[in-house]
Amino acid sequence: PPLLDMRQVTVDYQSRRGTVPAVRGVDLTVDAGQTLGLAGESGCGKSTLAMSVLRLLPRSAHLGGDILLDGENVREMSWGRLRAVRWASASVVFQGAMHALNPVRPIGEQIAEPLRLHRATTTPAAVRTRVNELLDQVELPVARSTAYPHELSGGQRQRVMIAMALACSPRLIIADEPTTALDVIVQAQVLDLLSRLVTERQLGLLMISHDLSVLAACCQRLAVMYQGRIVEEGPSTDVVRTP
Ligand code: ADP
Ligand code: ADP
């Protein structure tokens, strides 16, 4: 089966203003070794879709449809099963790493968090070794593991998030605006890193951005979202060419 197979996925938020339909009947698949780009203007439902895959949605959200992770329906998983697949089968790299990282914990400890949750690595020495390996993979100096998020650049913080996402070796990565806050050169470096991981490890990557040109540069396939729906999907060259 594909790593990710979304079928007729809907998400509604209940708010004081009533029901907000954020995602409406979305079908998407991501295969191993493939990057699918998801584009669309702000507010069209991209982040909601990203959060729905691992059911990281707020309580006010209602999820419908089917989300198959490697053939297993996320909507039918118990909380225990969900805990087991988060970080281990799939990880989400959220936008604005400053927001997602804990400001008062050294980055090495944060990268180790998924390992501890999954008891994947048992001894403190083994955790340290794995964290160093991950820092190396995202091209951060090992000596930086004791640094705090505010001591790093935006691009370095984004690399920390990627290291954390990779910690338990999931086969699927969902990257929600991973380069939005970065300048063009650093943006290209982070995209290059993600693309390299996809080819070298046959990961599946769902790459989300409001910027079609960013996606066109690194995705074989593109889907365009508008008001909660996928309005276009196909090889990047075709989608970008359409007026
Ligand atoms: P995008 O990531 O494309 O900017 P979002 O998924 O953040 O879009 O938002 C999709 C829609 O859902 C928007 O109309 C937004 O206002 C609404 N929305 C997002 N989060 C909530 C929430 N917690 N409660 C109510 N509405 C929300
Ligand atoms: P908590 O406060 O319980 O950690 P969260 O909403 O932050 O609540 O996370 C819920 C669960 O999802 C936790 O088990 C957490 O480890 C996992 N999780 C959080 N963020 C991610 C992510 N980006 N990718 C994969 N799993 C995540």
Image (spheres, grey):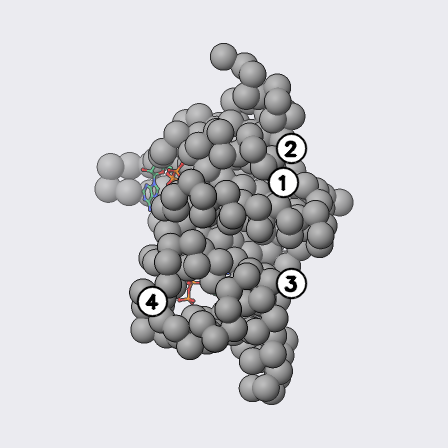
* Sequence-first disc among 4 and 1: 1
Residue 200 location, x and y as percent? Answer: 71, 52
Which residue sits at x=37%, y=58%? 153
Residue 49 location, x and y as percent? Answer: 48, 42
Residue sitting at the far left: 16
Cβ of mark 1 under 8 A from ligand 2: no
Q: Quick check: which quadrant has ligand 1? A: top left
Residue in front for this viewpoint, 3 or 131: 131
Cα distance, mark 2 to mark 1? 6 Å
Residue receiving disc 1: 35
The answer to whether the residue labelled 2 contacts the one labelled 1, judged by CB atoms less than 8 Å apart, is yes
- Depth check, mark 2 against mark 4: the one in front is 4
Give the secondary structure at mark 1: strand
Give the secondary structure at mark 2: loop
Residue receiving disc 4: 151
* Sequence-first disc among 2 and 4: 4
- Residue 169's label in the rendered image is 3
Image quarter (top left, top right, bottom left or bottom right) of the N terminus? top right
Residue receiving disc 2: 220
The answer to whether the residue labelled 4 contacts the one labelled 3, judged by CB atoms less than 8 Å apart, is no
Cα distance, mark 1 to mark 3? 17 Å
Residue 39 placement, left or right of 15: right
